[in-house]
Image: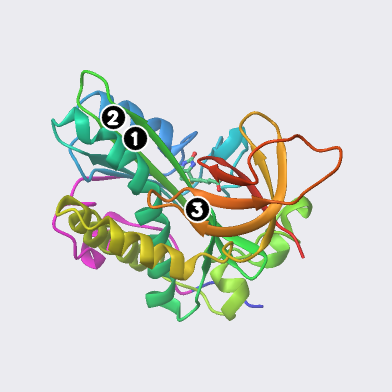
């Protein structure tokens, strides 16, 4: 596979030209290198950065994933960005935003890949962006509802132009990229602009209170539903069962398989957070 030659570095001008949003990305910070765009964006949000401000980096030296994992972030190939979303002064709305933001962000990322490439990623609950059984991207949402007003930092990593042989060995069987799936390279500024546009549309829909639409859109893309899964819960407990449906708040309902020596408990579990493996 040939090197992605057409689109080299991200530039301020390239991003500005591609943007079509009203708020998201209208303030953006393009960094050559940082430890983690989420860490930078979180500090900026605490210091008062506006709704929609975005931090993008060409390379992360300590990219962070969910559940304390790291995120492989080599230079010049992929997209590493963090978006600051503010939910206004209504503290009673904070749980609403915390619940729905990861779901709309995952759908927005999958849609952005689809509209720019024709690839059709699926979502592994809660918000892994997958092509088949391989991971194309992921989301790390971090939030606070402190005195500086509530905000969420939505961190998104998407593997775009990295070639399969460039992944470290431990990722080669489990990760993929848009380039690996389609054999062509992509302009990362266009991807970023599509992502922000898809996210802004859904954020605006939530402002006017349309979570049922969000949920059905998420469910249509969620490849976990109907699968036999193993879920590792925050407590460390492991549950095996059928991922039956989504709750009205985006939780995952799993019908636990009976096991003679397994823990006793309700046979339908409502899972808020966990690490899911799709079983065969
Ligand atoms: C996961 O699937 O584990 C989540 C990965 C999130 C990675 C992105 S890259 C941009 C942002 N900055 C980080 O340090 N992490 C997120």
Residue farthest to the right? Answer: 261
Answer with the quarter of the image where residue 65 lies: top right
Whether 162 is drawn above or below 241: the answer is below
Earlier in the chain: of badge 1 and badge 3, it is 1
The residue that disc 1 covers is 41
Please, what is the dominant secondary structure of the magenta stretch?
loop
Which quadrant of the rendered structure holds the C terminus?
bottom right
Whether 65 is drawn above or below 183: the answer is above
The residue that disc 3 covers is 127
Taking the spot 45% from the left edge, 65% from the top edge, the residue there is 219
Q: Start and end of the magenta stretch?
A: 6-30
Label 2: which secondary element: helix
On the image, the x and y values in percent for residue 142 come to 40, 34
Cβ at disc 3 under 8 Å from ligand 1: yes
Horizontal side, residue 214 vs residue 207: left or right: right
Nearer to us in this view, 117 or 164: 117
On the image, the x and y values in percent for residue 135 come to 61, 60
Q: CA distance from mark 2 to mark 1?
A: 5 Å
Answer with the quarter of the image where residue 204 lies: bottom left
| Circle number at residue 149 | none
Residue 273 among magenta residues:
no
Q: Are marks 2 and 1 in contact (CB under 8 Å)?
A: yes
Q: Are marks 1 and 3 in contact (CB under 8 Å)?
A: no
The residue that disc 2 covers is 44
């Amino acid at each position: 596979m040939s090197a992605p030659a057409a689109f080299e570095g991200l530039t301020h001008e390239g991003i500005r030209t591609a943007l079509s949003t009203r708020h998201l990305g209208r303030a953006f910070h393009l960094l050559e290198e940082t430890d983690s765009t989420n860490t930078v964006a979180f500090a900026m949000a605490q210091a008062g950065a506006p709704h929609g401000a975005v931090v993008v980096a060409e390379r992360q030296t300590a990219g962070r994933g969910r559940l304390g994992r790291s995120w492989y972030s080599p230079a010049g190939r992929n997209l590493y960005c963090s978006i600051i979303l503010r939910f206004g002064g209504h503290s009673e709305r904070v749980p609403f935003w915390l619940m729905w933001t990861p779901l709309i962000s995952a759908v927005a990322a999958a849609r952005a890949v689809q509209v720019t490439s024709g690839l059709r990623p699926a979502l592994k609950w809660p918000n892994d962006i997958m092509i088949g059984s391989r991971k194309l991207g992921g989301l790390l949402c971090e939030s606070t509802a402190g005195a500086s007003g509530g905000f969420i930092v939505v961190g998104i990593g998407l593997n775009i132009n990295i070639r399969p042989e460039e992944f470290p060995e431990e990722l080669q069987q489990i990760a993929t990229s848009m380039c690996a799936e389609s054999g062509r390279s992509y302009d990362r500024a266009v991807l970023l602009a599509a992502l922000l546009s898809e996210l802004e549309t859904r954020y605006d829909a939530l402002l006017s209170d349309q979570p049922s639409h969000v949920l059905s859109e998420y469910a249509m893309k969620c490849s976990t539903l109907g699968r036999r899964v193993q879920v590792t819960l925050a407590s460390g407990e492991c549950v095996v069962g059928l991922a039956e449906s989504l709750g009205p708040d985006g939780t995952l309902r799993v019908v636990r398989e009976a096991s003679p020596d397994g823990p006793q408990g309700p046979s339908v579990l409502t899972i808020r957070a966990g690490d899911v493996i799709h079983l065969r």
